[in-house]
Amino acid sequence: MRGRSTEQERIGRLLADGRRGNSGALLLHGEAGIGKSALLDWAAGQAGDARVLRVEGIESEMELAYGGLHQLFLPVLDLVDGLPPAQAAPQRAGLGGCRINN
């Protein structure tokens, strides 16, 4: 990717921190067509064996509380119960108390 070395370096550090067990977040924002999706595709390719979860925001669903969170965690909802209580509680709250019973 040309001209995105600063962003790539920042994403690389975030991924490296994640591999060491440290959490983090990065917000990508900007006008349509500036390459946000291309940068996210690049980041997913750098993630190695880490699980990558992605959703697309849809303007018509903007008013739905936690709609994106539901979409993001639906494929891994069964893993919430395996989280430590301090991390599982806010996930359940954001997902409306959803639980998977096996």
Image (cartoon, rainbow, N blue to C red):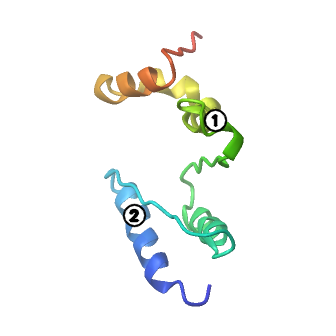
Structural crowding at the residue carrying mark 1, measured as other residues with C-alpha within 10 Å and reported as few (<14), some (14–19) or many (≥20): some
Front in this rendered view, residue 58 or 6: 58
Quarter of the view holding residue 73: top right
57 in relation to 32, above or below: above
Q: Horizontally, is 85 left or right of 27 in the view?
A: left
Structural crowding at the residue carrying mark 2, measured as other residues with C-alpha within 10 Å and reported as few (<14), some (14–19) or many (≥20): some
Front in this rendered view, residue 44 or 57: 57
- The CA span between labels 1 and 2 is 23 Å
Quarter of the view holding residue 14: bottom left
x 54%, y 61%: residue:
47
Q: Horizontally, is 8 left or right of 10 in the view?
A: right
x 55%, y 89%: residue:
3
x 59%, y 34%: residue:
63
User: Residue 100, percent across and down?
Assistant: 57, 15
Q: Indicate which label's residue lies in the foreground, 1 or 2.
A: 1
Sequence-earlier tag: 1 or 2 = 2
Secondary element at tag 2: helix
User: Residue 98, percent across and down?
Assistant: 53, 16
User: Residue 35, percent across and down?
Assistant: 64, 74
Q: Residue furthest bottom?
A: 2
Secondary element at tag 1: helix
Front in this rendered view, residue 80 or 61: 61
User: Residue 88, percent across and down?
Assistant: 38, 25
Type of amino acid at the residue the image marks with label 2: Leu
Quadrant holding the C terminus:
top right
As drawn, the label of residue 14 is: 2
Type of amino acid at the residue the image marks with label 1: Gln
x 43%, y 62%: residue:
15
As drawn, the label of residue 71 is: 1
Q: How many marks?
A: 2
